[in-house]
Structures are given as C-alpha cells and as structure tokens.
Image (tube, helix red, strand yellow):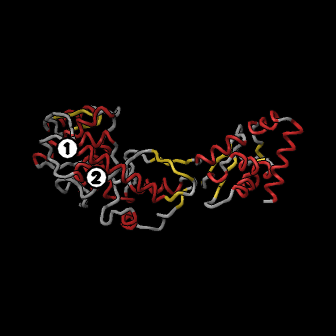
Amino acid sequence: MRRFFMSFLVLVFLAGLLGFGAAGWWLYEPLRLRPQPGNQVVDLEIEPGTPAQRVAEVVAASGVDVEPVLLYAWFRLSGQARQIKAGSYEVTPGTTPRSLLSMLVRGEESLKSVTFVEGWNFRQVRAALQKAEALKPDSQGLSGDAIMTQLGKPGVHPEGRFFPDTYTYAKGSSDLSVLKRAARAMDKRLEAAWAMRQPDTPLKTADEALILASIVEKETGKPSDRAEIGSVFSNRLRIGMMLQTDPTVIYGMGEQFDGNLRRRDLLADTPYNTYTRGGLPPTPIAMPGKAALLAAVQPASSKSLYFVSRGDGTSQFSSTLDEHNRAVNKYQRGQ
C-alpha cells in the first residue's frame, strides 16, 4: 500500500511538473527495449496469479527499459490491473505503456505455429513437432498407440489421422494439444467428405475413404489429376482388380526404403503391398488434404484403370492394358 501511495505521488509530481499533457504523452511514448541478442523483441512470461505490481517488475526484468513503479501506478490508475491475464507475450518496438496494458488485458499472447504438409506420414509429423519452437514435447517417448490413447482414440492407428494444416499455439503449449486439434480437424473433414460420397462408391466406410484418399494424395503429381486418379482406384476396387500402387509398397518398407523401388520390392509381401494383396491396405499411408478426400469419394466419371507419369507432373490415363502399355513405352521408355 505504501509503495502504491509513493507511485501515485510520483505520477502526481510528474503531472504537476510537466503538466497533464506531458504525463499523458508518457502513456503513448514507445517503451525502450534493451538490446536483445539476434532480435528486437522482448519475450514476456506472466505466470497465473501474478499480481499487477509483480507484472510491472517482470516487464522491466525481461528487457523493457521502464521504471516498474511508474508502470505499476499506471496499471492501478487505469482500473484494469486485476484484468491482466497470464500468458506468453512479445513486446515489440513501438509498444507504449497504454498498448502494453491493452495487450495484457486482452490476453493477446504471442503465438508460434507448426505446419503439417499434405502427404506427410506420422513420422514426419512427429519430427515437425520436435522442431517446433516453444512447444512442450509431451509426446516424446510415447509410442503411436500411446499417443492415440492420450488423444482419446485408443486402438486407432495414428497414420493419416491428422489434418494437414498450419496450427498456431501459445508458447509452452503441449504438442499433444496440437495433435488433438489436428485429429479433430481430420475427423471433421472426413465426416464432411463421407457425407458427400457418390451413391455407387465401392468404399464401405469413412475409414476406407481416408485410406484411399491417402493413396490419391501420394499418387497425385498435378492437382487437376486427382479426381481421375481417384477414378482409377475406385474402378479397380469395383471390379476386384489389385490397386498396384507404388506408394503403398514404399510405406510398407518403412525406413528400409532407400529412394529406389526395385522389382524385388514389388514382390516382397507386406500388409501394404498392393501388388501382392487385393483391396485397400490396412491403414492410410499419409495425411490426405481436403482435395484428396473429395477425390476419393467423388472421383471423376471414367473407365480408366491405368495411369502413368508423363514426366512433367501430369499423368496419362488409359482404360485398357494395350493403351497403357503404349503410354508406358512413350512416356517412360521413349519409344
């Protein structure tokens, strides 16, 4: 109480000495930041339950060149001292005492982000989380099964269950909270796509749609080909023809894949080898995006059963084996 009274007297003295206009000018004058290694931003951490007086002291201790007594007095005189919220904040050049208080009262925390890319597998997702800045690594050391249990999805395979997108988070957030948001986003996207499926789809469940969408995602070189690629696989499923798609074989090889897919790899049976086993693989092989989900449930109307890369990212589609062989000779063998 005595310190507050002294702070109040200081402000009164300033107002009397410089005039109320000058005292008001202080509230709008940008705070000076002490030099920070490598950047011009002061990181500010306000713990839950921190009183306004301590907040002012933390601001100064974090690297803002300001008198804590004056800052605390301003917090109190504003009538908003008790509304300051805990969190992680960034004080940037141009921040004034007035804008600082507004940021703290509004809880405008500094946010970081992590991006999951379409076509990534779960190993790549975990690697991105490990590299993400200021994210608590609560999932490190946990198996995929344990992670899914933590997310409320026990027994669900983690592959393909997270929607590829950019997710923002406050500093110190758990990586499990990011995964939970990504899982919910995929559930929502998959539910919406499944509701839009064509009546004659060979897919029996939404999970099968997710698996097929992951294959479409990995096979697509050009976005405009997605629906036609979806049609090829749907047509094959419909007539009981093997999918024979390389990305599933590569996924089944795991870390043994060295970047070169050989004939012996196509003959080595695994649950994901669609050259040796009919139907869809047991799980997705990657994270499909929205377009791939739609291509799986709303494929193009075609009779195509084959496709081969033209070498420029696009694919040549064929409805018969003879047509396909000619396309392979032209685009792959240069004949």
Q: Quadrant of the C terminus?
A: top left
Residue 328: tell me if it is visible: no
How far, Cα to Cα, is label 2 from label 1? 13 Å
Q: Nearer the viewer, residue 187 or 57?
A: 57
Q: Nearer the viewer, mark 2 or mark 1?
A: 1
Residue drawn at 78 percent across, 35 percent down? 25
Amino acid identity at mark 1: Phe
The answer to whether residue 258 is left or right of residue 100 is: left
* Quarter of the figure with residue 251: bottom left
Whether label 2 touches label 1, CB < 8 Å? no
Amino acid identity at mark 2: Thr
- In the picture, the disc for residue 233 is 1
Q: Nearer the viewer, residue 195 or 119?
A: 195
Where residue 78 appears, as percent x and y from the top left, is 69, 45
The answer to whether residue 107 is left or right of residue 28 is: left
Where 313 sits versus 173, above or below? above
Around disc 1, counting alpha carbons within 10 Å, would you say few (fewer than 14), some (14 to 19), or many (20 or more)? Answer: many
Where residue 176 appears, as percent x and y from the top left, is 45, 60
Where 324 sits versus 162, above or below? above
Residue 170: tell me if it is visible: yes
**On the image, numbered disc 2 is attached to which residue?**
248
Residue extending farthest to the right is 17
Around disc 2, counting alpha carbons within 10 Å, would you say few (fewer than 14), some (14 to 19), or many (20 or more)? Answer: many
Residue drawn at 31 percent across, 53 percent down? 285
Q: Secondary structure under badge 1?
A: helix
Where residue 260 appears, as percent x and y from the top left, is 36, 50
Q: Quadrant of the N terminus?
A: bottom right
Residue drawn at 21 percent across, 53 percent down? 280
Q: Nearer the viewer, residue 146 or 334?
A: 146
